[in-house]
Amino acid sequence: CGLPTLASSASSVGSGSDDEDGGSRPNPRDTVQRNSKGFSDFRVKKIDQHQFGRKEIELAEQEMGGVMTLRKKAAADQPLAGARILVCIHINAQTAVFIETLIAAALAEAGIPIFAWKGEDDQDFWWCIDQCIETENWTANLILDDGGDATNRMSKQFPALFRQLRGIVEESIPGVHRLYQMCSREPGAPSLLPCPAINLCDSVVKPRFDTYYAAREGIIAGLRHTTDVMLAGKYACICGYGNVGKGCAQALSRMCSIVVVTEVDPICALQACMDGFQVRKLDDIIKTIDILVTCTGNKNVVTLKHFERMKSGCIVCNMGHSNTEIDVSVLQDKRLTWERVRNTVDHIIFPDGRRIVLLAEGRLINMSCISFPSVVVSVTSCTEALALIELWLFSKEKEEHEKRVKASGGDFGEKFSDRYKKDVYLLPKKMDEYVASLHLPTYGAHLTELTDDQARYLGVSKAGPFKPHNYKY
Amino acid sequence: CGLPTLASSASSVGSGSDDEDGGSRPNPRDTVQRNSKGFSDFRVKKIDQHQFGRKEIELAEQEMGGVMTLRKKAAADQPLAGARILVCIHINAQTAVFIETLIAAALAEAGIPIFAWKGEDDQDFWWCIDQCIETENWTANLILDDGGDATNRMSKQFPALFRQLRGIVEESIPGVHRLYQMCSREPGAPSLLPCPAINLCDSVVKPRFDTYYAAREGIIAGLRHTTDVMLAGKYACICGYGNVGKGCAQALSRMCSIVVVTEVDPICALQACMDGFQVRKLDDIIKTIDILVTCTGNKNVVTLKHFERMKSGCIVCNMGHSNTEIDVSVLQDKRLTWERVRNTVDHIIFPDGRRIVLLAEGRLINMSCISFPSVVVSVTSCTEALALIELWLFSKEKEEHEKRVKASGGDFGEKFSDRYKKDVYLLPKKMDEYVASLHLPTYGAHLTELTDDQARYLGVSKAGPFKPHNYKY
Amino acid sequence: CGLPTLASSASSVGSGSDDEDGGSRPNPRDTVQRNSKGFSDFRVKKIDQHQFGRKEIELAEQEMGGVMTLRKKAAADQPLAGARILVCIHINAQTAVFIETLIAAALAEAGIPIFAWKGEDDQDFWWCIDQCIETENWTANLILDDGGDATNRMSKQFPALFRQLRGIVEESIPGVHRLYQMCSREPGAPSLLPCPAINLCDSVVKPRFDTYYAAREGIIAGLRHTTDVMLAGKYACICGYGNVGKGCAQALSRMCSIVVVTEVDPICALQACMDGFQVRKLDDIIKTIDILVTCTGNKNVVTLKHFERMKSGCIVCNMGHSNTEIDVSVLQDKRLTWERVRNTVDHIIFPDGRRIVLLAEGRLINMSCISFPSVVVSVTSCTEALALIELWLFSKEKEEHEKRVKASGGDFGEKFSDRYKKDVYLLPKKMDEYVASLHLPTYGAHLTELTDDQARYLGVSKAGPFKPHNYKY
Amino acid sequence: CGLPTLASSASSVGSGSDDEDGGSRPNPRDTVQRNSKGFSDFRVKKIDQHQFGRKEIELAEQEMGGVMTLRKKAAADQPLAGARILVCIHINAQTAVFIETLIAAALAEAGIPIFAWKGEDDQDFWWCIDQCIETENWTANLILDDGGDATNRMSKQFPALFRQLRGIVEESIPGVHRLYQMCSREPGAPSLLPCPAINLCDSVVKPRFDTYYAAREGIIAGLRHTTDVMLAGKYACICGYGNVGKGCAQALSRMCSIVVVTEVDPICALQACMDGFQVRKLDDIIKTIDILVTCTGNKNVVTLKHFERMKSGCIVCNMGHSNTEIDVSVLQDKRLTWERVRNTVDHIIFPDGRRIVLLAEGRLINMSCISFPSVVVSVTSCTEALALIELWLFSKEKEEHEKRVKASGGDFGEKFSDRYKKDVYLLPKKMDEYVASLHLPTYGAHLTELTDDQARYLGVSKAGPFKPHNYKY
C-alpha cells in the first residue's frame, strides 16, 4: 500500500508546545512507544499529549483553507496512490495537517511512521532519518527534503535504495545548491541524480510567503511576544533589505517606527530609498537605534564595536539566517552581566550600566518566539504536495509508456513528452498559479476570466499560465 | 511625614504576572503580611515574589523616560512634601514606577501601605479602600482616583475626612461626570466638593496616549498573543470609530487587513471615509468578516443574530469598554460547545460545525492579554503627578496667604490669584506641554525655539503655552 | 424679496481660470457691465467668459454632493426666505455653487449682485465691499464673513446699518478673534455686537476638511502641478506639525518621501514622534533637505541662513499662512539670478551655481497652483449655510415671540428659549453632525442606528448629538 | 568621427511642451531647417523654441544625478569613441540629456542629426527613421531601439547596412520578442541577427522604475493634472495587478482611497489580497466605483456594459498599454454627448444625465497628461548607455583579437572570451548594480561594504555581483 513515511529533521517549534521539563523524560530512542491502536512504528516526545496536539492540528486546519481544499480534491483523485514518500521536514501542528493531506492523496490508512521529537541532538537526528530510510518492508520512491539531509544520507549510505527513487522535492537553498552540483558537472559526465528533482526555492508563491509576508507579520509578533515596548516613534535599524528585510522594514514603518536600512547591494539599497527608507552604515547610526533587526543572511553583522556604542534599552534581534548575524560570543564576557528577564529575553548589563535587550540569544525570533502563520504553511504544503504529485504522475506515465514500448518490441511512435530528465527543474508556473488559486477563497477573492478574444489578444490560454517565464511578480 | 498611601481598585494586569494557581493561597485579607524590613501595612498576593516584581519594575523604568526625568526633578524640588495622597488605581509594574515617583516628590521613605491583589472580589475591593482611608495616624489630603470610587466612598462614609481634602485628581470619564454633578447643581446651591478637582479625561496628551496610541499598538499585540492568524488580507470590522476605533482601524489596515467600520455618529463615520475605510452596518457585512473588534463604549453591539451568521473561524474581541459590547450571554447555550484552546481563547462550536474564536470571553483584550506599553503609563503618571503637584502647591500657597491675611488682621492687599475654587478644572495647557516635553528625549526629538520676534508675531510666550484654549491637536 | 448679496474679498483662484492677459482690460470699477438679461448690479473680470464659468460650476456640482442635497432640501423648505445676506468670501466655481444654494434656500430669483475680480487691489477690494453694503433699496440682515472685513467695515463706516443685523457668521481665526473682542469686554460693559454671531473656526467638521484633509491632498497636488520630481526617497522637511503640517507629513510620507518635522510646541512634536516622524531643528538638517514645506502660521521660518546652506535643487514652498513664512525678501539680491522656469516656479541661482526651486514666490501653493477639492468647499458651504439658517430662524422665532408678547401686553408665559444673545457661539454639535451626514452618501457610507436600549445606556438621543461637548474627534 | 545619430519614433511628450496651435505650421518634412550655426541635418517642430527646450533640459539635469555622473565618467573614458548609434526613442527634455551623454561618451561634437516632431503621422515616422538610416557618409554600427521599429526597418529595407551592425539594445517587450524570434529558430538554422543584442526588458532596475515606481507617482500626478477630485474616501478600481497596477493601487490606497482590484492571474490576485486589497470582478462592483484605472495590458477591459452601469461622475482612465484597454469606440454613439471640460478631460453625458469623466480619450494618462519623473529617465538612460557600451567594447575587443589571430596566421592561443554570439542576452547583473549605485547619491544613501571574511562566508566578490542569477528582488 502507498503509505507515506516521515522523518523530521528538527524538533517542533511554536507557541503551542512550550516544553520546559527538560531532562526528566527518557530519550525516545530508548523506548518503544505505542499509540492507542497498538501501532508502534514511531518515536515522539509525549505520546500522552496527543489530545493537545490534535487540538492544535484542528486550530491549524481552520486557517489552512488552501491545503484543506487540496486534501478534498486529492482524496477523490488519489494522485499519490502507490507513492512511498520519505518526508524530512520540521514537525508542528501545521505540517501535521500537510502530512495528513499527503495520506489523503494516497488513500493511506492508519498509522504514519514518524520519528521526531523536540530537543533531538545530532545523533538522534540521523537515527530518525535512518529509521525512515530503512523501514522494514518499505522503500521510499519519493523524497521531500528541507536541507538536503535525507537526500544526502541516502545517496551516501544507501546507494541501492537511492537509485530506486522516482523524484526529489527540495525546498531549501543549500539543498537545492547540492542538487545542482549533482546534476551539472563537467560536460559529458552523467548526472549523479537517479531521477528528476524539483527546486521549490525559486518557485513564485511559496518563497514570497515564507520570506516577505512571514517577516512582515513575524517581526511584529516576535517583538510583541517578548517586549512591551511601544513601536511608534522608535528608531529601528533593519540590516539587510532582501525579502525578509523588506517585510520587517514595511511592518515597523507602518507601526510608526522610524526605519533606517543598511545594505551592501546597491540594487536593494535603491529599493529601500524608493520605499522611503534612509540607507546608512550601522557604524554611523548605532548610537540612535532603539530596535536593531538583522536579516542579511551574513555573519558578524552586529559586533562588539556596535554593542559598545548602543543606547541603554536597545533591543537586538535576528530575523535572518541561523544564529550567525549577531556575534553573541563577544557578550560572553565576565565584565558583562546577563539577566534573564523573560523567556527568550536577556538583559546584558554593561559596566557603565547600559542594558542591551537581546532576544532569543541571537537566534531567529520568528522560530524561537512565535509560530509561522498557518496560511504560510498552507502555501508551502500545497506547493510541496503538487511538486510530489507532478513527479509521481510523470514517473507513472513514463513507466507505462516504457512498458508499452517494450511490449510492442520497440518505439512504435507513441507520443510521449520525456519532459523530466535526471536534472533539477523549477515548479511549472501552472502549479504556482494553482497554489495561489487554492488560497484565494480564504480571502473572498473573485478571479476575472479572460474572454476568448482577450486570451487570443494576449496569446495565452484562458486557463493559464498567464505570464512569460521571466515575469517578475 | 509626607507618606503617600495607596489602595488599588483592581488586580494587577499584564503578561509578567500570569497567575494560574487559583484557590490554593489564602485570601490576603485574612493574613497579616510582613516584608523583609518588618513593615506590615500592606496586603498583596505573593510577597515572596517581590524579586520578580522588582525586575519588572526595572524593565518598566527603561521605557518610562518621562516619568524618570520627572522623578529626578521632583527628588530635588520635593513639591509634594507634606502631601498625603490616597491613590486608587490599577497596580502593575509600571504604576509602581509612578508610586515611587510620588514618593521621590515627597521625600518619603521606607514602606508604602499598599492593599491590592489579583482576583479581588467586590468586598475585598472596598475593604482595601477603607484600609487606606482609615490608616492609623494618617489622613489623606489629596486623592488620585480612577473611577471615582475612593472619592465616592470617602464622601459617603467618611464625610469628616472628606472635608479635609485639598485636591482631587480624577482620570476616568464616569469619575469626572460625578465630580461635575457634585459642583454644578442648581444656581446658588453650594458645591458639594470640599476642594478643587482636576479632570484629566479632557487633558490633551494623556487621553491621546491611552486611547488612540495604546489601541493602535494594543490591537496588534492582543491578536498576536492569542492567535497565529496572518492579518494581511483578512476582513476586519471595527465597530466604533472613536479614538480606540481609529487606532485599531489604522493598525489593522497598516498590517494589510481590509478594514470596514461601523458607526452611529455621522462625524466619526465621515472621518472613517476620509481615512479610507468603508462604513457599513454590521448586519450587512457580518458574513464576510474574519476579525471583529468592538470599541463603541456601547452595549450589545454584537448579538445572537451576528453570531449566527459569522464565518467559521471568525475572531471576536473587545477593545472598547468593560464587557458589555459583545453579548456573550447568548453563547451560554447548551446547543453550543465551548472549547478552551489557549489561555484567553475559546472556540464556541455551533451545531453546524462553525467555530467562533472568542478572545478574553468578551472582556478587554488589551487588559486581559497584554500590558499597556510603558510609555503610555509614563505619560499618564506624569500627568497625574503634575495635577497633584498643581493642586498641592496651590493649596499651600493659599494656606500661607490666608495665614498672612489673618496675621495682618484682614485683607492687606496681598496679590493672590484664587484661581481654583471648589470646582472641576481642566489641566493647565502648560502642564500638558510639560508632560509632552518630558517624553521628547525618548524619541530623540529636538524642539525649535521661537525667536523674540516670532513670539511677538504669534502673540505667545516663548515658553508656551503655544496654542489657544480650544485648539484641536 | 430675499435676495442675498455678495461681495468677494479676493480674486478667484484655481486651475480653471488661468489669467495671464494682465493689463489689457480696463479696471472693472470703471465700466458698467451688463449680463445677457440686462442685469447690471455686478462687476467681474470677463463677463464674456460666463459660459466657461458655468461649465466649471457644473463640474463642481458633480463633486459637491453634500451641498446639492442641502440645496434640494432648502429649495423645499426655504429656511432663508426673507434673509438678505452680505457674503464676503473668495469666489470661484465652487463657492458659486454655494451662492446658488443660498438663493435656493431663499427662493430668490434672477441676478445676484456680485462685485469681485481677479487682481483686485486694496482700493478695489473695499470699493466692492461698499457696493454690497450700500446697494440701493437693500440692507443686509445677515453677514457671512471670512476675515472680518465686511463686519468691521460695516461697524465702523455704516453703524446704523450694522445695528440692524440679525446674525453674523465668521469663518476665519482673526475674524473670530475680533468678534470675541467685541463682546467680551470688561465686566458689565455691553457687547458691541448688534446680534449673535457664530464662530465656524472651532466647529468640528469644517476645519478638519479645510486644514488636514485639504493639506493632505493639496501638498501633493501642488508639487505635481509645478515639478516633475519623484517624491519617493526624497527628504522632505515639514516646518510645523499643526493640522496642515500633519496633512503634509502624512501625504509625503505615504508617497515614500522621508519626512522630518520641525516644531516649537512639545505636544505637536510628540504627536509627530508617535506618527513616526523625526523631529529636528531646521538649522541641523537643512543641508540634506530636498523638499521644504512651511506650515507654521509663523513668520521668517526659512531665512537667509537656510537658503545659503540648501542643496542645489531644493524645492521650497509654503502651505501655511499668507506669505510670511519664507523670508523671500532676502532673495531679492542682485548677486542672485531669478529664472522663471514654469508658471509659479522660479529658480534662484546662487553665485556658487546652486539652484533653489521656489514655488509661488513663497505664497500659498494650495491657493496659487491648485484648486481646493470640491468636497472641501461643499463641507464649508454646508456649514456656512446651516449657521446662517440657525441664526436666521432664531431671529424670526424671537421676532414673532416678541410680537406676541407685545400684542398680549406683557409676558404671557410663552415658552421661548432665548438661547442666542449678543455673543459669539460655537456651531451646535447637531449641525456639525448634519453637515457630516450630508456628505456620507458621496462615500457610500451606511450609518448604524442606535437601538432604544443602547441610546438609553449611553444617555443620548437616537438622533444625536452623540458626543459630549469637549469630545476630541 | 563617432557621431551618434538619432531618429525619434514618437512625438515629444510632457507638460513643458503644451502645443495647441495645431495646423498652422507647415509639416517639417517640407522645409529645410537650420540652426544658429548653420547645421541643417535635422527636422523638429519649432526650432525657434530652442531656448525653452534648453531650459527644460537644464531642469531635467537637476534631477538626473545618475546620468550626469555617468556622463562625467564617460567624458573621461570615451568608451563609445568610434560608435555610430542609431537611436530610435521618444524625445523630450529628459531623453535629450541622455543623448548628450552618449555624445560625451563618444567625444562627438557639434550638431546631432535629429528627426522628430510632435504630431508625426505614420508616414512621417518612417520617413524620419529612413533619414537616420540613410544619412550621407554615415552608417550606424549600433542600434538603440524601443519597439523594434528601427531594427525591423533596417533588416527589411537595408539588409546590407543591417549586416554591418555590431550590437542592438532593445527596451520594449514586443521588440525583444521579435529579437528572440530572429535568433531562436528551428535547431540548426542560423540566427537572423547580425550581432549580439541586449534585452533591457528583463533587467532588474530599469523595469522596476519605469513600471512600478513610475506608476505609483504617475497615477496621482495624472489625476491631479486633470481633476480636482479629492482622492480620500473614493472607491478606486484597479484593473490588473501587475507592476503598474501594484503601483497605482499602492498610491491610491495611501492617499486614502478604498481600492479594489480585478485580476485574471491567481498569483497576482493573491498578492493583491496580501497587500490588503479586495479582489473582485468589475461586473460585480462597477456601480460603486468612483475612479476606474486600467493597467492590464489587455483589450476591452472596460466595455459598454460597464459604462452603462457606472455612477455619474465616475472617472475612467488608462495607465496600462496603448489605447486598447478601454473600449472607447462604444462611446462614439450619437445618443451620447461629449463635452470637453478641460484639456484631456471629456464628459460623456448619457441620456439619463449621468456623466462619465474620461481622461485622455482612453490613452495612457501618464503619457498624455504628465511627464515621467526625471529620475526614471535617468535610470533608463544609464541602463541603455551601459548596454551600448558593453556591446561596443566587446565588439572592439573581438575585432582586435581577430586582427591578431589573422596577423599570427591562425589561433595562437590568445585567451579571449567570446561571450556574446548572435543571440539575445540579459544585461549583466553587475551593470544593473552599477546603474543602481549611480543613483544612490541622489538619495544620500550610504552603502555598507562587506568585510573580506563576510564576502568569503557568502561566496561573493566584495565588488559584486551580490546575488544569484534567479534572485527575486
Image (tube, coloured by chain):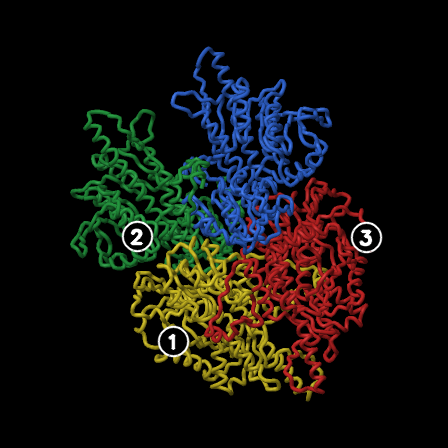
Chain colours: A green, B yellow, C red, D blue
Given the image, on which type of amino acid does mark 2 rest? Asn
Which element is circle 2 on? loop
Residue C27: mark in rendering: 3
Q: Is residue C158 rendered to the left or right of residue A96? A: right
- The single residue placed furthest to the bottom in the displayed view is B409
In this view, the mark in front (3 or 1): 3
Query: Residue A73 versus residue B222: which sits nearer the camera?
Result: A73
Q: Position of residue A425 (x, y in %)?
A: 34, 35
Callout 2 and callout 3 share a chain: no
Neighbours of disc 1 within 10 Å: few (<14), some (14-19), many (20+): many
**Residue A226 falls in which quadrant of the image?**
bottom left
Given the image, on which type of amino acid does mark 1 rest? Glu
Q: Position of residue B448 (x, y in %)?
A: 64, 58
Q: Is residue B440 above or below residue D276?
A: below
Q: Are marks 2 and 1 in contact (CB under 8 Å)?
A: no
Query: Residue C2 versus residue D410: which sits nearer the camera?
Result: C2
- What residue is at 48 percent from the left and 59 percent from the top? B249
Query: Which residue is tagged 2?
Result: A92
Which element is circle 3 on? loop
In this view, the mark in front (2 or 3): 3
Callout 3 and callout 1 share a chain: no
Q: Are marks 2 and 3 in contact (CB under 8 Å)?
A: no
Given the image, on which type of amino acid does mark 3 rest? Asn
**Looking at the image, can residue B438 be seen?**
yes
Q: CA distance from mark 2 to mark 3?
A: 83 Å
Neighbours of disc 3 within 10 Å: few (<14), some (14-19), many (20+): some
Query: Which residue is tagged 1?
Result: B120
